[in-house]
Image (cartoon, helix red, strand yellow):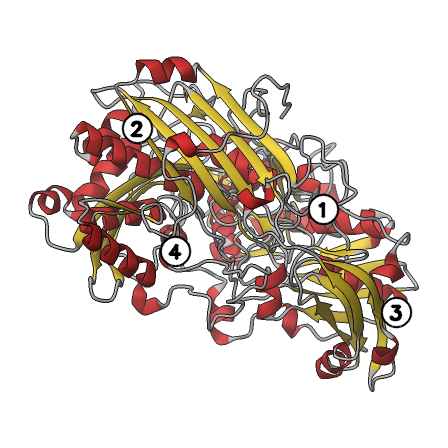
Amino acid sequence: MPRTEDLALLTGTARFIDDIRLPGMLYAKILRSTTAHARLNGVDLSKALQQPGVRGALCGQDLLGKIKPWGDMMQDLLVGDHFPFATDKILYEGQELAAVVADSKHEALDALEMIEVDYDELPVVVDPEQALRPDAPLIQEGINYEFGEGNIFDRYRVRVGDIEAAEADADIVVRQRFSTNRQAGAALDPHGCVASYDSFTGVLTIYSSTQSIFMVRDILADTLQIPRNRVRVIVPEVGAGFGSKAQMFAHEVIASVLSMQLGRPVHLVLGRGEIFRAGTARNGQVRYAELFCKQDGRIIGYRDYVVHNCGAQSLWGNQVVHIGTNVGMLPYPIPNIHVDADIVHTNTAPGGPLRGFGIPQTIWAKEQLVDLAAEQLGMDPLELRSRNVLRPETFPFRTPMGQVVDSTSIHECLHQCAEAIGWKQKKAEPVPFEGVGLAVSMKYTSCRHPSFDTDLSAVRLRLETDGTVTIFSSDVSHGQGHATFLAQIVSDVLGVGFEKVALAQPDSATSPFGLGTFASRAAAVLGTACRQAAERLREKVVAIAAHVLEANPEDLETGNDRVHVRGLPDTGLYLENLAGYAAYRTHQLPPGFEPTLESVATYDTPTEREASDGSGNLSVTYSGAAHAAHVRVDPDTGRITVVDYAMAHDTGVVINPLIVEGQHQGGFLMGIGMALGEDYAYDEQGHMLNASFKDYQAPYAPELPELTKMYEIPAPSVTIPGGQKGAGESGTGPVPAAIGNAVYDATGVRFTALPITPDRMLLALREKERRGMASFRYPDDMPEFTGPRSAGEWPAPTASDEGDLLL
């Protein structure tokens, strides 16, 4: 089925946040800090308030004691470290200092220039490892984190099996320090909202480009201290989110407060530079990782110390480490796992969820260790992976880490992508400065986050009196094709024409409660709720038809927009007739039948809370991904070209192949950006140096290979009733590691830090040649590298192993 959403998008008639126009609407803009760390002495708004067209202005002192600070609801924080504006201290460049609302955007921007800010600069720390030092400047002050101290927001620990015994029993041990970059969500649709307060009804309506309407509603209502049924969140079209819109932001509070003060709608849409500096980015990590193997290639242990940069504020930071580590151990059932993590504040933009949610960072380290182990064992990396990936004789299979894998074709995916890339031939006939690399991963399909005990979506269906069906859901579509695949499910179950099914706009006043759209959960979790609601609605229409036709319900079927006797599809009653009976001719309903043709269903996944040792089955099912990359490196320029790329996935039962293919292509795009260019660049004073698409190296279309080698090898989920698995993120996880391994195969340079840019490549090649080394690590073997070069110099986790660290 072609996507029903595409016509409006391609013709420019789809309505996004910036397209909304309400009567009497005003425009707000935010003054942001140009320094990364400072004591804030005062903000003077007086001159700004005198500017033409200005209707009001706010700063932090205006809101102290009037609204509540908030934490991330999804982390269930006991303290709030978020506020609309800095009050006594600036924590990062781009933090909100004040806002002006005026008759036009330009007048608001002009007035921002008249605001006077008095502050005293403080020392800045942008490196998470430096932030751990005892003499590092303290970033968050006055907040007592439950398991953190100083600049440590939280700590994390995994203790599965006996890692000391695994180390003693290992025939080889490979160790390496790895680091990953900060990557932007870079959604085409900018962050923004329109808030409109009705003083007569006391209802605050906010149109927001968000991934979760009820998360915004509940946190916003709590922050403003108004009842939840007096806050209405509506979502128009959302041009992508990737996790970067999966929380409430300060601009939503600011617009709401201004609208409540002035009694007029307030439009507040962020510019691209604001989103780079103050939106969330993929969390950067430093990993001190070790892999223990037997001579036959069996992986028997994995140990890691992770320093996780969550930026100046938390924003899901501990969740990314928990889930990215737990699920990132797949697809290998490693029996002994020992992980420590320090989740650290720095004077940089807040880190948060981004496509893959911590798994790409884990795979970057683990899959390169696998190649290092293969090299030391003298074994083909394909063979080493083939011996270790999950291949149980029976399902479901519980790994030592606690994941319950209900089905997988990861072994077949591995060999399919290797064959498609020409692995054996290319390894047997190497070409100078060309190489191939592999990586595998498994991605959760939705996830029960450690901090709350639910993983649900809900759907309400209504059969209208003309035989059409309306779907109500709070899960926001921002590229996943909800209107299409949900209509396919309803059409299949109810027998109604696909073209007669419509998805209503997400609206907290009319939609059933749901967590939102993230974590590759739409098809599996929302789709299951939709299937169950459609089955309940089908039971109702069949019951009415059986009564009217004086037939046995078991003898009736649905199809062709009607309910008919089995084997007689051209007979029976049309759905619109049955809906008419329920609405206007209730005397024709069965005795005791409730006169409505609506149904509601909620699906909550049968998963587990995280155990105290870090183990647990956090996902309902797992999608498999095996990727193979063929790269070419230009030794004169350092340019890396992905010549060919093969992807084999297990997405279970595919509802819509076009949508799934698009999700895998988009996932690859984010993966290659993480591998070859994207990164937040900060100077020592915390100034972001590339806060625009002019300087931020997102991939361009000509830099991408033709993605023609894409394969689905379905192993249908036996837990999800429809058999489907998540597709949105499985295409991202293996990409950086596959490209990194291919680059090493082509050049002998093992990149341990992302991204692999042409200038870094050129520097590494020249230094490798100068020193006459057969293999070279970048940046570890560069003369100017100041970090630890060997495992003997590695730092230890800050938490004592004997300490009682609760999760």
Kind of residue indicated by mark 4:
Gly
Name the residue carrying label 1. Answer: 140
Q: Circle 3: is it few (<14), some (14-19), or many (20+) Cα within 10 Å?
A: some
**Residue 244 drawn above or below residue 637:** above
Expressed as whole percent of the image width and height from the top left, the position of residue 556 reads 50, 35
Q: Nearer the viewer, residue 698 or 304?
A: 304
At x 48%, y 27%, the residue is 339
Under circle 2, the secondary element is loop
Name the residue carrying label 3. Answer: 263
Name the residue carrying label 4. Answer: 662
> Mark 4 or 2 closer to N-term?
2
> Mark 4 or 3 closer to N-term?
3
Disc 1/disc 2 C-alpha distance (Å): 42 Å
Disc 4 and disc 1 in contact, CB within 8 angstroms: no
Kind of residue indicated by mark 2:
Val
**Residue 286 drawn above or below residue 496:** above
Name the residue carrying label 2. Answer: 389
Disc 3 and disc 2 in contact, CB within 8 angstroms: no
Outermost residue toward the bottom?
52
Disc 4/disc 2 C-alpha distance (Å): 26 Å
Under circle 4, the secondary element is helix
Q: Quadrant of the N terminus?
A: bottom left
**Nearer mark to the viewer, of 4 and 1:** 1
Disc 4/disc 3 C-alpha distance (Å): 43 Å
Expressed as whole percent of the image width and height from the top left, the position of residue 311 reads 60, 50
Disc 3/disc 2 C-alpha distance (Å): 60 Å
The answer to whether any part of residue 331 appears in the image is yes
Outermost residue toward the right?
200
Q: Nearer the viewer, residue 575 or 318?
A: 318
Expressed as whole percent of the image width and height from the top left, the position of residue 461 reads 63, 46
Under circle 1, the secondary element is loop
Disc 1/disc 3 C-alpha distance (Å): 35 Å
